[in-house]
Image: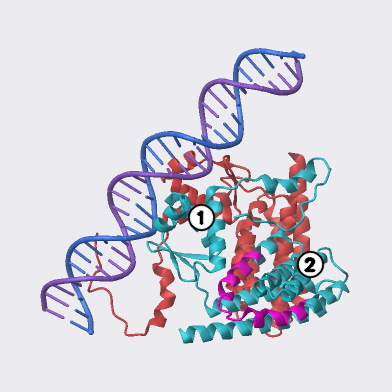
Chain colours: A red, B cyan, C purple, D blue
Amino acid sequence: MSTAVPGSVRQLPLPGRALEADRALLARTSTAERVADVLRTRIAEGLFPPGARLAEDTIGSGLGVSRNTLREAFQLLTHERLLTHELNRGVFVRMLTIDDVADLYRVRKLVECAAVRGIDSPPPGVERVADAVVEGERAKKQLDWQGLGTANLHFHQALTALAGSPRVDELMRRILAELRLVFHVMADPRRFYEPYLATNREILGRIEVGDGSGAEQLLAAYLDKAQEQLVDAYAQRTTDG
Amino acid sequence: MSTAVPGSVRQLPLPGRALEADRALLARTSTAERVADVLRTRIAEGLFPPGARLAEDTIGSGLGVSRNTLREAFQLLTHERLLTHELNRGVFVRMLTIDDVADLYRVRKLVECAAVRGIDSPPPGVERVADAVVEGERAKKQLDWQGLGTANLHFHQALTALAGSPRVDELMRRILAELRLVFHVMADPRRFYEPYLATNREILGRIEVGDGSGAEQLLAAYLDKAQEQLVDAYAQRTTDG
DNA sequence: GACTAGAGGATTGTTGAACGATACGACAAG
DNA sequence: CTTGTCGTATCGTTCAACAATCCTCTAGTC
């Protein structure tokens, strides 16, 4: 194994604190985390649909990791609520109930509205909201409906980021990750996402002029409508069988 | 190790659906979860103070479980933010920074205030809030300051439960569990908790008459004050060092 | 024929051991 | 005092094994 290369590393005479931001960069990840990354992607892609069982043996040999490591990865995803773990039966891709969808939107409404309510002047971080709106409009122009969907997620993530709380950010990441499990049921992402583009820009406008409660009202209306659409589609799909 | 659930377990003679609530009771737990329970308790007790290292070998042989199982338990607690995991170095009891404390109170303010704001009539679940107030008053009478502290936690948990969202409930559980890591620095729990008893009753009163925004204001003031006290104590302790 | 009981196979739960990789402390050399 | 080297303790990961549990399929009973 090669040790440190003496000549290539330049010494910066800056005091400690300046380097702390770089620590995240050299933080390596364990095998379990990388496995979890892979599985997370596959689930989001729909390769493992909700309800699918992930057998330790199959996945483990498929990915070339031991059962123990794989179990650690499973645990990570279970805590993200992407998988459910049934004792002695194995892990399954989470299947959201209608109650779950309702609760997810309950949380979104609580968090997102609270994040914008107090605004009375253009807050720091508003640029990221604007970026997400532009991202969505660009995706629409390119008829990239999947891209439109992710742009919408970015928009709402940027909204909650206005609260300025790492923990709220993480909560929102998890909420949206859960919701992605259910977005698959939307047969026509265009019809689902496209109407919200205008709303998003409108909300952005309110925020930019410091009208927090105006933004909140629009947001609440949006969330109610989206939830309704989703619940409808969900109910229909389950009755269709 | 008995995790007594004070909530009354009432038997409903209804078919099928009524039994679903009981599933949690007979859900067996894996060894890893039970180990996590034990460690969680020990951490809350202060046996493992913040910063302490939990060596796999020591703890594992101490508890009589294998390293693999113990690692699963560690992961559970790491995801609850009670432990931090440093690659190739091990797991440590989390040490909260002042920024962490600030963020925890930011989240509390966001969530708790949102949970009571919308109230315009006595909401379902208000009894549990009342129970927590009574619990605190009883603890005070018995000069049980530790009990007063947990009663206070119950009060705020009951408040957030008014939102009626399982995910918000869980968020709050995690937030308060993290805060417990820092409550240890309060040298005098009596002086810290006692003044809040009156405030709690006052907040309960507002809720009982359906005055949500009144409750919200009191709550916000309480949280600001508590945070300030905690940050002061924390800063002092770290400078004393 | 429908239902219950039980045997057998498959999968998970948990353990123990092993080996490489990494971090930390000690010690010697400059 | 700093730097390089080394040894030890610990972690990361894998493997193999066995016990516990679940699922399915068969066989028997009514």
Q: Quadrant of residue B167?
A: bottom right
Tell me the subunit letter for badge 1: B
Callout 2: SS: helix
Give the magenta-colored segment's residue range.
B173-200
Residue B235: x percent and y percent? Answer: 53, 85
Residue A80: x percent and y percent? Answer: 58, 57
In the image, residue D16 above or below residue B62: above
Q: Quadrant of residue B213?
A: bottom right
> Magenta span: helix, strand or loop, mainly?
helix
Closer to the camera, B63 or A102? B63
Q: In the drawing, does residue B12 fall left or right of residue B63?
A: right
Q: Which amino acid lies under the numbered mark 1 shown in the image of this protein? A: Ala
Residue B125: x percent and y percent? Answer: 81, 63
Closer to the camera, B188 or B52? B188
Res. B73 mark: 1
Residue A42 falls within the magenta-colored stretch? no
Q: Which amino acid lies under the numbered mark 2 shown in the image of this protein? A: Asp
Res. A49 mark: none
In the image, residue A61 above or below residue B170: above
Q: In the drawing, does residue A220 fall left or right of residue A16?
A: right
Quadrant (top left/top right/bottom left/bottom right) for the N terminus of chain A: bottom left
At 65% from the left and 50% from the top, the residue drawn is A184
Closer to the camera, B237 or A116? B237
Quadrant (top left/top right/bottom left/bottom right) for the C terminus of chain A: top right
Res. B131 mark: 2
Residue B122: x percent and y percent? Answer: 87, 69
Dot in front, 2 or 1: 2
Closer to the camera, D26 or A228? D26
Can residue B193 be seen here? yes
Label 2 neighbour load within 10 Å: few <14, some 14-19, many 20+: some
**Which badge, 2 or 1, is on the more N-terminal residue?**
1
Callout 1: SS: helix
